[in-house]
Image: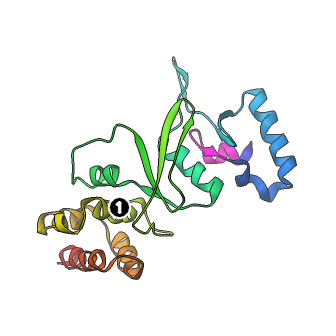
Amino acid sequence: MKRIRGKGRGWVFTPKHFLDFGSRGAVDMAISRLAQSGSIRRVGRGLYDYPRLHDTLGALSPDPAALAGAMAAQTGDKLAPAGAAAANRLGLSTQVPARASFATTGRTRVTKAAGRSLTLRHSRAPVLDHASDTANAVVQALAQLGRKAVDADVIQRLAGRIDDADMKQLLQARPSMPGWMGDVILKIGAVHHG
C-alpha cells in the first residue's frame, strides 16, 4: 500500500509492478486482498487502480492514458499518443478523437476496462524509448499526416511545440525512422534553433 500511495491516486498498475516484493503468487494474493478490502479497485484482467475520489461522485474512472500505460506494461510494449490524439495535442488539428486510442509497439487490440473501450493500435512509426510523450507525439503525428501533408506550416508549428530535450530525443531517434521523417526532423531542428 505504501508504494501505491506513493504513486498517488489515479495510478493504474498490474501485479508486475510489485514483482520485486516476492513471488508472483504472493503478490497476486496481496493485491487481491487489497482489492477485496476496497483500498484498490480491479479495473480489468490483471489491472488495478488506486482510484481518484470525488466528493459527491465517489471513485472516478481511471484516466485512459494511465490505463493504456498499465496495459502496455503487462505485455512489455512501448506506448505513444496515437496519430489523431498526437496531432491534436500538438495543435495540428482541432479534431478531438472520440475514442481513447494509443500507438503501441505491440499488436493492435481493443480492450474494455473500467467500462471504457480503449484501442492500442500497432504503430507503423517507431515508438521512441525513454522519450517524452511530446517527442513521441511528433513521430505519431507525422506518421498520421504522411509525407505529402507535411509542409512548412506543419514544421513551424511542431518546432514551436517542443523543447530542447524533445528535439534532442527526436534527432537521436532519426535512424529508427523512415528516411522522409528523419529529414522532416532535421527541418524542425533548423526552425527550432533558428
Quadrant of the image containing the N terminus = top right
* Relative depth, front residue between 119 and 10: 119
Left or right of 17: which side holds 61? left
Q: Residues within 10 Å of mark 1 (few under 14, many from 20)?
A: many
- Picture quadrant of residue 36: top right
Where is residue 108? Give x, y as percent: 50, 53
Query: At x 41% / y 65%, what residue is drawn?
Result: 124
Q: Which residues are magenta?
A: 3-13
> What is the residue that sits farthest to the top in this orientation?
56
Total labels: the figure holds: 1
Where is residue 177? Give x, y as percent: 37, 76
Left or right of 31: which side holds 159? left
Query: At x 79% / y 36%, what residue is drawn?
Result: 32
Please name the amino acid that badge 1 sits on: Gln
> What is the residue that sits farthest to the front in this orientation?
108
User: Which residue in the structure is indicated by mark 1?
Assistant: 140
Left or right of 63: which side holds 138? left
Query: At x 23% / y 52%, what residue is drawn?
Result: 91
- Picture quadrant of residue 62: top right
Q: Is residue 76 magenta?
A: no
Image position of 150 with respect to 107: above or below: below
Query: At x 36% / y 60%, what residue is drawn?
Result: 137
Circle 1 sits in a helix, a strand or a loop, which is it?
Answer: helix
> What is the residue that sits farthest to the left in this orientation?
152
Left or right of 148: which side holds 15? right
- Picture quadrant of residue 72: bottom right
* Relative depth, front residue between 179 and 137: 179
Where is residue 5? Give x, y as percent: 67, 42
Quadrant of the image containing the C terminus = bottom left
Image position of 135 with respect to 5: above or below: below
